Image (cartoon, helix red, strand yellow):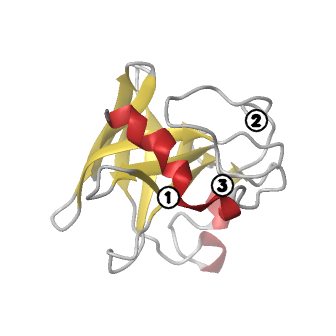
């Protein structure tokens, strides 16, 4: 089920996600700059009620076992949500992504047919795109070189980078 899209807007990946109970009218993808093969490819950002960009998820590269199609998989989560929203981002011809909701089912290695670890040829692996940060307009990544949260002690002043994007 398609629940949104992300496209290139002013050089940044921006879009929306909407379901019956969730409405994120403005989300953005920020490239993660990490040498760690287990680090996500993108962080998912959303505008909060104060119009500040906040991280609400992350995406890892995955490969569909049957088709070999490369896509991004992850979750959107926030304390305001009753549970994480599992999502898959599929590339579109215009350089953006179509966002699909996915139901987590039993992992295929336990007899199910869902997005379990056995259905990925690779998740978060490789080093493509991790060599240097691409300026996305959303500021620097919060992932450290070892995949840990970087700058956690920086306080709330780091929000200034996000606020300047919304003038």
In the rendered image, the vertical position of residue 86 relative to residue 92, given as above or below: below
Dot 3 falls on a residue whose secondary structure is strand
Q: Position of residue 81 (x, y in %)?
A: 33, 74
* Residue at left offset 80%, top offset 30%: 131
Q: Secondary structure at mark 1?
A: strand
Residue 132 left/right relative to 162? right
Cα gap from disc 1 to disc 2, whole angstroms: 18 Å
Q: Earlier in the sequence, mark 1 or mark 2?
A: 1
Mark 1 or mark 3, whichever is nearer to me: 1
Question: Percent position (x, y) of residue 98?
Answer: 36, 38
Above/below status of 1 relative to 32: below
Q: Which mark is residue 57?
A: 1
Is disc 2 in contact with disc 3, using a CB cutoff of under 8 Å? no
Q: Which residue is mark 3?
A: 120
Among the 4 quarters of the image, the one containing residue 150: bottom right
Closest to the observer: 137 or 90?
137
Whether residue 84 appears in this view of the structure is yes
Q: Where the C terminus falls, by quadrant? A: top left
- Horizontal side, residue 113 vs residue 19: left or right: right
Within 10 angstroms of label 2, few (less than 14), some, or many (20 or more) residues? some
Where residue 149 sits in the image (x, y, percent)?
70, 60
Crowd tier of the residue under label 3, counting other residues whose Cα lies within 10 Å: few below 14, some 14–19, many 20 or above:
some
Q: Which residue shows up at 38% across the image and 19% down it?
A: 10
Residue at x-position 76% and y-position 35%: 130
Left or right: 79 in relation to 1: right
> Which label number is shown at residue 111?
none
Q: Quadrant of residue 146?
A: bottom right
Q: Which residue is mark 2?
A: 130
């Amino acid at each position: 089920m398609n629940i949104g899209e992300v496209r290139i807007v002013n050089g940044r990946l921006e879009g929306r996600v909407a379901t019956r109970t969730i409405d994120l009218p403005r989300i953005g993808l920020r490239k993660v700059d990490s040498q760690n093969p287990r680090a996500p490819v993108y962080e998912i950002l959303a505008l909060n009620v104060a119009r500040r960009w906040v991280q609400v998820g992350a995406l890892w590269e995955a490969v569909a076992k049957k088709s070999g199609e490369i896509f991004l998989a992850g979750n959107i989560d926030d304390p305001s949500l009753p549970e994480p929203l599992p999502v898959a981002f599929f590339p579109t011809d215009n350089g953006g992504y179509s966002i699909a909701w996915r139901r987590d089912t039993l992992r295929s290695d336990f007899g199910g047919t869902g997005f379990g670890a056995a259905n990925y040829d690779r998740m978060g692996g490789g080093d493509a795109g991790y060599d240097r940060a691409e300026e996305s307009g959303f500021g620097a990544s919060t992932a450290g070189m070892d995949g840990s949260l970087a700058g956690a002690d920086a306080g709330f002043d780091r929000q200034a980078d996000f606020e300047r994007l919304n003038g």
